[in-house]
Each structure stands twice: as structure tokens, then as C-alpha cells.
Image (cartoon, rainbow, N blue to C red):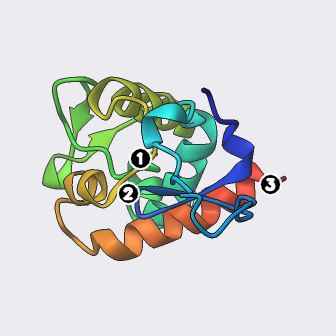
Amino acid sequence: MELPTSRYTFFSGAVTPKTAPEVHSATEQVKAPQIEAVQAVDLVILSKAVAIAETSNCTQGYGVIYNNCHGIKRGSIVKCKYGKGKMCIFSTKEESFLAFQKIWAEGYGGKYPTMRSAEVWTGGDNAHTWLKHVNITYNELSNT
């Protein structure tokens, strides 16, 4: 059974229903939805949420200096020229968004971020805070 993503809220990689399912008897078990049953994350919305978490939507740090809105470092999925700290240098901000979407689809399976993937993406640098901001922003952008 495939569950519509619009009925679910994501937090720390867990999927929980926005409204509790109806229980008809005290003995009936309510099963939590399985993450595999939920469709893949919207990479466009996720790329916006990550840009906001990383560089305040390209207005700070590497977002301004290198057009690197997502904190992307030189790696195997996206080849790039790089500067300080091996941070990729992009010609445009749009190039950063496309690179992030490709990296997340290929390197992270196109799935919604979990605490583990947040730790990998951030290198363990405030991963919990990063994931919290991504969750909040993703949900806000999804509802607009």
C-alpha cells in the first residue's frame, strides 16, 4: 500500500502521521507507516531547505564567495573546481542547486534526510541542528 506523502510529517528521519489513525477497539494495533512506503523526497524543495540551513539561502559564507549554497565539497559525484576547505566553486547559484540534487539522488538515494545522513552531509558539525532546520524549512515549503 502506498501512502501519500502529504499526510505525513518528517522529523529526524522518522515518518509520523499528522493525524492519529482511527482505532476501533482497544485490542486493535495501530502500525506506524514504514518509511519505504513513502514516496521519495521532493529534491527541489529539499535543495531549498538545505540551502537555507547551510548558507541562509546563498546569502552567507560559501554561498556568496563560491556560489555554493549547500556546502558541497569536492567529491566523486560532482566534479568541480574547489577553493578553501575543498569547497566547490560554482559559476552560478543554480549550478549549486542542480549539483545538490544530483548528489542527494545518487549518493543518498533520494530519500528524506535522517540523523545518519545529516551527520555524513555535515561531517558531524552540528548535524542535529542542521537536520532540525532542514525539517522545519522542508515542511514549511511543502505546505506553500
Residue 56 visible, this angle: no
CA gap, disc 1 to disc 2?
A: 5 Å
Q: Is residue 73 above or below residue 36?
A: below
Residue placed under numbered mark 3 in the picture: 143
1 or 2: tag closer to the N-terminus? 2
Circles 3 and 2: CB atoms closer than 8 Å: no
Kindly identify the residue that appears in the image at 63 percent across and 43 percent down. Answer: 45
Residue 68 shows which numbered tag? 1
Say which residue label 2 marks: 62
Residue type at mark 3 is Asn
**Residue 95 seen anywhere in this rendered image of the structure:** yes
At numbered mark 3, what does the secondary structure look like: helix, strand or loop? Answer: loop
Residue appearing at x 61%, y 36% in the figure: 44
* In the image: residue 138, left or right of residue 15: right
54 or 60: nearer the viewer: 54
Q: Earlier in the sequence, mark 3 or mark 1?
A: 1
Per the model, the C-alpha gap separating discs 3 and 2 is 28 Å
* Mark 3 residue crowding within 10 angstroms, few (<14) / some (14–19) / many (20+): few
Q: Position of residue 107 (x, y in %)?
A: 27, 30
Q: Sequence-wise, which precedes: disc 3 or disc 2? A: 2
Kind of residue indicated by mark 2 = Tyr
Residue 89 location, quadrant: top left
Numbered disc 1: secondary structure: loop
Residue 80 appears at what percent x and percent y?
A: 26, 28
Asked if the residue under mark 1 is in contact with the one under mark 3, i.e. CB atoms within 8 Å, the reply is: no
Tell me the crowding category of disc 2: few under 14, some 14 to 19, or many 20 or more residues within 10 angstroms, Cα based.
Answer: many
- Dividing the picture into quadrants, the one containing residue 143 is bottom right
Q: Contact, CB < 8 Å: mark 1 with mark 2?
A: yes
| Element class at badge 2 | helix
Task: From the image, state whether disc 3 or disc 2 is nearer to you.
Answer: 3
The amino acid type found where label 1 is placed reads Asn
